[in-house]
């Protein structure tokens, strides 16, 4: 897996092979690429060959390993599909989820579909955006859908996880957004720490110069920032959200206000701690970034009703707004439990962290919200 996707490039026929397998043999597709062992169950070579014209596009792209001396093939990554709300051909998102390491890359396809649904319902216009910025792009789930939806646009994806950016570039080629020999890529990625201030970068830094050149120039900014509410000592390296989980969301709001042009749109999905009625932590700074005299407010941190939140063993399990006491359920999540134990922590320590970080401050519920503004 360590050589994927750095040393592999998907050929044009790889996408069509995956599409045929997914569309006509969904059960085989899921067994090969989505069964968590960690990526898929070894598949009989003959059974897979009967589903597609050739296995070579999948082998050459590094998606499966062909064991010549055995009858099995084995997948090298998890592949999720965005289809229901993209209004385009399916988008295939390759990641190393559910690897249990601190740099693993999550697919977040369910959240991408939620983002796209809200965008189509409340925001989309007939004017095609020229420049789209995907903050915290991860493996590219939202940005690639927008690049396919708007074929004349340029999409720039930022993330602080270099492994995520490699997957995003791979997925851009896999889904025919970029081509192997293309000079000017339609989907570009840049490593960018969402928490750092622009002034922390040297003035000669290429990323800083490019970032500053986009001030007030971007038509659409999208964001689905990571929200890690684990104790800091066991959080994933690139997704820790600070003491209350919202620091990356706050910075995304600040960055969007910096980038948007006149009539430009920012739409973000996020989580926010609050009381039972409102998402207090993000509401604290909303007006600082988006004063109503400068922005048309489409959604001021509106809750998404009955949305599932808080992943336990990889699955969202509780409806929002969720009582933060339910966070204790993650103590039974095997990778969480293992990391916590290694630090010499117990269930009592975890409960005390929930009490002091949230409940004692009046933050009793976790909200799943969407924010949308248009610059006047």
Image (spheres, rainbow, N blue to C red):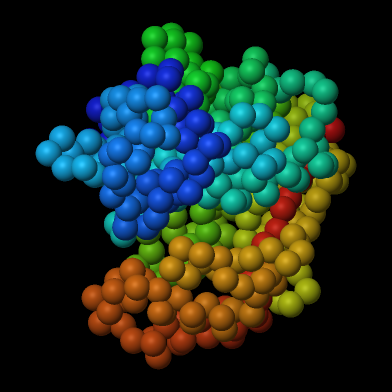
Residue at the location (15% across, 35% down)? 68
Quadrant the C terminus occupies: top right
Q: Position of residue 174 (x, y in %)?
A: 44, 26
Q: Name the one closer to the observer, 362 or 185.
A: 185
Which image quadrant is residue 296 in?
A: top right
The one nearer the camera, 138 or 171, is 171
**On the picture, is 269 further left or further right than 1?**
right
Question: Does the image show residue 11?
Answer: yes
Q: Is 257 or 13 nearer to us in this picture?
A: 13
Residue drawn at (76%, 69%) of the image: 278
Residue 68 horizontal side relative to residue 149, left or right: left
Find residue 22 and report its horizontal and vertical position in percent.
51, 38
Q: Is residue 162 visible?
A: no
Q: Residue furthest bottom?
A: 348
The residue sitting at 61% across, 29% down in the picture is 89
Left/right placement of residue 271 relative to residue 343 reads right
Q: Position of residue 28 (x, y in %)?
A: 43, 46
Q: Toward which corner of the image does residue 164 lie, by quadrant? A: top left
Q: Quadrant of residue 165?
A: top left
Point out residue 16 in the picture as x, y percentages from the top left corner: 48, 25
Residue at (75%, 45%) from the top-left corner?
Answer: 118
Vertically, is 30 above or below 163?
below
Image vertical order of residue 208 relative to residue 84, above or below: above
Counting the numbered discs, the total is 0
Report the quarter where the N terminus lies.
top left
């Amino acid at each position: 897996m360590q050589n994927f996707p750095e040393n592999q490039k998907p050929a044009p026929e790889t996408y069509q092979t995956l599409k045929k397998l997914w569309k006509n043999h969904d059960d085989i597709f899921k067994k090969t690429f989505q069964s968590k062992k960690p990526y898929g169950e070894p598949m009989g070579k003959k059974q897979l060959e009967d589903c597609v014209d050739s296995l070579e596009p999948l082998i050459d792209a590094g998606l499966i390993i062909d064991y010549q001396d055995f009858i099995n093939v084995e997948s090298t990554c998890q592949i999720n599909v965005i289809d229901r709300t993209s209004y385009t051909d399916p988008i295939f998102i390759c990641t190393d989820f559910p690897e249990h390491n601190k740099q693993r890359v999550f697919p977040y396809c369910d959240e991408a579909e939620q983002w796209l649904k809200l965008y189509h319902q409340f925001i989309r216009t007939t004017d095609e955006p020229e420049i789209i910025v995907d903050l915290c792009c991860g493996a590219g789930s939202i940005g690639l859908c927008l690049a396919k939806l708007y074929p004349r646009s340029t999409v720039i994806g930022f993330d602080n996880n270099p492994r995520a950016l490699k997957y995003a570039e791979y997925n851009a080629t896999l889904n025919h957004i970029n081509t192997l020999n293309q000079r000017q890529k339609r989907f570009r990625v840049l490593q960018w720490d969402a928490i750092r201030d622009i002034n922390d970068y040297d003035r000669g830094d290429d990323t800083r110069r490019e970032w500053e050149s986009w001030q007030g120039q971007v038509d659409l900014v999208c964001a689905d920032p990571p929200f890690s509410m684990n104790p800091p000592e066991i959080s994933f390296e690139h997704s820790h959200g600070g003491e209350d989980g919202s620091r990356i969301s706050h910075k995304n709001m600040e960055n969007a206000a910096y980038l948007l042009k006149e009539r430009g749109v920012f739409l973000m999905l996020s989580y926010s701690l609050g009381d039972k009625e409102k998402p207090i932590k993000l509401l604290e700074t909303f007006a600082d970034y988006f004063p109503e005299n400068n922005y048309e407010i489409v959604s001021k941190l509106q809750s998404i009703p009955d949305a599932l939140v808080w992943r336990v063993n990889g699955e969202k399990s509780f409806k929002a707004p969720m009582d933060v006491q339910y966070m204790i359920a993650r103590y039974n999540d095997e990778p969480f439990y293992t990391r916590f134990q290694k630090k010499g922590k117990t269930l009592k320590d975890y409960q005390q962290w929930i009490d002091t970080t949230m409940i004692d401050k009046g933050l009793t519920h976790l909200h799943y919200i969407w924010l949308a503004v248009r610059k006047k």
